[in-house]
């Protein structure tokens, strides 16, 4: 899947309100989203901005006491992760297949 720093940064910014909420900080929903961002960053070439983002994600991963999903409705971190996946898919290059039957 295509990754870019702008998408990771946008997603991390969207997660900041949940990170500030103690009950959300350790939730598996938020933590799972942060792991996805960390994995994406690990696949990108490094530079100064990359290092800052990676540090922010790793710091966020260390926040809060881990716990299972509380069943919040809506689950903002879950919705943000879904938006992240949708944006990734929209950025994928779909190869054009030539029609050979005509």
Image (spheres, helix red, strand yellow):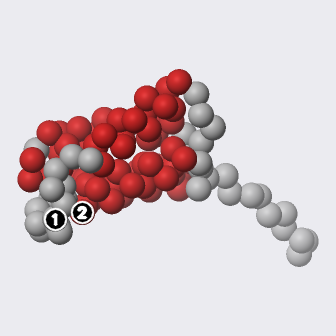
Decide which of 23, 14 is in the foreground and name it.
23
Q: Is residue 93 above or below residue 17?
A: below
Return the x and y of residue 79 as percentages of the image width and height. 27, 56
Could you say which quadrant of the image residue 86 lies in? bottom left
Query: Could you tell me if the residues under marks 2 and 1 are in contact, i.e. CB atoms within 8 Å?
Result: yes
Q: Residue furthest top?
A: 48
- Answer left or right for 13 relative to 63: right
Q: Secondary structure at mark 1?
A: loop
Separation (CA) of disc 2 from disc 1:
6 Å
Give the position of the N terminus as an image quadrant: bottom right
For label 2, the residue is 28
Q: Nearer the viewer, residue 14 or 56?
A: 56
**68 and 95: which one is in front?**
68
Q: Residue at x 59, y 42 (%)?
A: 44
Whether residue 11 is visible, yes or no, is no
Give the mark, 2 or 1, whose residue is nearer the N terminus.
Answer: 2
Residue appearing at x 36%, y 43% in the figure: 58
68 displayed left or right of 44: left
């Amino acid at each position: 899947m295509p990754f870019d720093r702008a998408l990771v940064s946008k997603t991390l910014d969207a997660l900041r309100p949940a990170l500030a909420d103690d009950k959300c900080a350790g939730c598996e929903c938020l933590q799972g989203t942060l792991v996805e961002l960390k994995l994406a960053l690990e696949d990108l070439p490094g530079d100064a901005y990359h290092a800052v983002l990676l540090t922010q994600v790793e710091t966020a991963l260390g926040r809060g006491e881990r716990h299972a999903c509380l069943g919040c409705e809506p689950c903002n971190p879950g919705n943000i992760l879904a938006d992240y996946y949708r944006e990734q898919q929209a950025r994928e290059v779909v190869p054009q297949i030539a029609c050979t039957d005509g």
